[in-house]
Amino acid sequence: MELRYITVSTTRFIRPFVTAALTIGLLTLGSCRKYLEQVPDSTWTDLSTPDKVSKLLGTAYPQSSYVTMCEAMTDNVADKGAGVISRPNQDAYLFRDIQSIEQDSPEAYWTACYVAIAAANQALEACDKAADKKAYATQRGEALVARAYAHFMLVNIFSRMYDPATAANDPGIPYVTVPETVVIKQYDRKTVAYVYDMVEKDLLEGLPLISDDTYKVPRYHFNRSAAYAFATRFYLYKRDYAKVVQYADQAFANNDVASNMRGWNTTYSSLSPEQIFDLYANAKENANLLLVETQSLYGRSVGQYRYDLDNARQLQVLGYNVTGGRWAYPIYYYGSQNYFVPKLTEYFVKSSVNATIGQPYVMVPLFTTEEVLFNRAEANAQLGKSAAALKDLNLFASKRIRNYDPSVHTITTTSIRNFYGISNEKDGLIHTILDFKRAEYLQEGMRWFDLQRYKMSVVHTTREGEILELKPGDNRWVFQIPQSATTSGIALNPR
């Protein structure tokens, strides 16, 4: 595949927000020293109008990717013996703390989340100080939901996954709610339960204020569908299943999920890999509810990492399924063992029009229509509403199975029992949902979260024959907090 290069002149893509980086210097002092030497850009520090606050909020989303490190820890990957060597990919596969602070590392993601949080807090302060607060209502809503999202991702990556039995004791992450005025400030991690409570508070306060009319390109911001999708994920992880269904039903006008899904067995089936790359993470694709540009090398290396999808794994994930049909996802490969589904590609942003240097970026869909469908199906399965769960699973299958025929491919509790050999109806539905999600989000890192939520083990085998197993409860499931954060009194995760 040819690597594409583009020149992006938009400031939003190539220049960090200075004030936001300053305010979070205490958490990532080493990473932010370069910002301390710069003069603040007045176009970002002048927040005297709602429109200017909206521009600031364009930076309130983590511009770093979790995909490389999360995907490499899952059961989707194998040691191919050769390929691109990257510490976020290699260390994660070997269940070691990642020895990198560059793109795609825990340090990069931690920093990006707190820079995004700082931008949201700066925007909230401007909204609170405005003479006409009503004029800033939609900006306040976006800032609250964006702040909630960044903290939610941090707590799920750098703390144990939420468990109502342990959340009140499990260490969380700092929940930052005000702009900072000092270089180094001490922080308390508190608990996972506390962070979830704060996320819920921000989410519920911000969600009713979200208005799509504010945005020029709604899919680059927390539009209403994306905010409701976030609510479904939050309450799914919190195990409040009735609220998952409630928010899923509000995510689309007239609850029209079907027309907002990605057409893998229709539109996509006639596209070349290059065309799919162009469309998959594009704002023109209705299935993408929220997109963010992330500084990442994943687009150039996916499929080619040493620890990546191989033939055995792609057959396991994308082979036969409970419908009896075949998935419509196209599989391509470089050479003999570098398999990939065309999804996330690189956009190389030159430092100037005539420059030969720059930074690699990947557009990442943070929320999609399909996730809303999966979250609702899982919640209904947990609530004992099998018919509702099956309805959503069959809708998904109708968009994903080659030559779909409802008389042949319709999923029933009987077909699930026969395929998996599971007699318990709820368990069979959950297995189906997790397998469908595994196929849908292959090479996107999402499998890692499901493996933890359902306390599954992962076994990795090296080419040398060493067997590595990550069991439920193993401390290595939780990514290590960056060493730089300890200057702010933040304790590292146990090992």
Image (tube, helix red, strand yellow):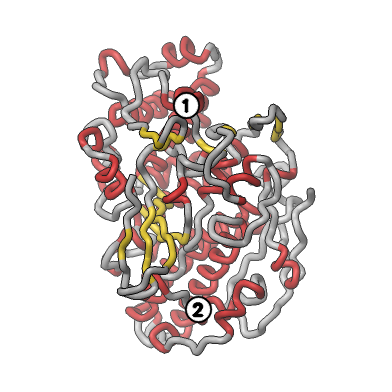
Residue depth check, mark 2 versus mark 1: number of the one nearer the observer? 1
The tag earlier along the polypeptide, 2 or 1, is 2
Residue 363, placed above or below residue 378 = below
**Displayed quadrant of residue 415:** top left
Q: Which residue, given by chain and number where applicable, does mark 1 sit on?
A: 311
Q: Are marks 2 and 1 in contact (CB under 8 Å)?
A: no
Instruction: Please report the residue visible at 36 percent of the width from the left and 58 percent of the height from the top.
Output: 347
User: Who is closer to the viewer here, 443 or 162?
Assistant: 443
User: Who is closer to the viewer here, 248 or 230?
Assistant: 230
Instruction: Please report the residue visible at 47 percent of the width from the left and 61 percent of the height from the top.
Output: 295
Which label sits on residue 122?
Answer: 2
Percent coordinates x, y for residue 469 in the rendering: 70, 32
User: Who is closer to the viewer here, 183 or 190?
Assistant: 183
Horizontal side, residue 443 vs residue 212: left or right: right
Horizontal side, residue 349 vs residue 422: left or right: left
- Identify which amino acid the numbered label 2 is placed on: Gln
Q: Does the rendering let one see residue 380?
A: no
Residue 197, placed above or below residue 412 = below
Residue 146, placed above or below residue 392 = below
- Mark 2 nearby-residue class (10 Å; few <14, some 14–19, many ≥20): many
- Identify which amino acid the numbered label 1 is placed on: Asn
Find numbered disc 1 in the image and state the secondary structure of the residue it sits on: helix
Instruction: Please report the residue visible at 76 percent of the width from the left and 51 percent of the height from the top.
Output: 169
Instruction: Please report the residue visible at 29 percent of the width from the left and 55 percent of the height from the top.
Output: 283
- Mark 1 nearby-residue class (10 Å; few <14, some 14–19, many ≥20): some
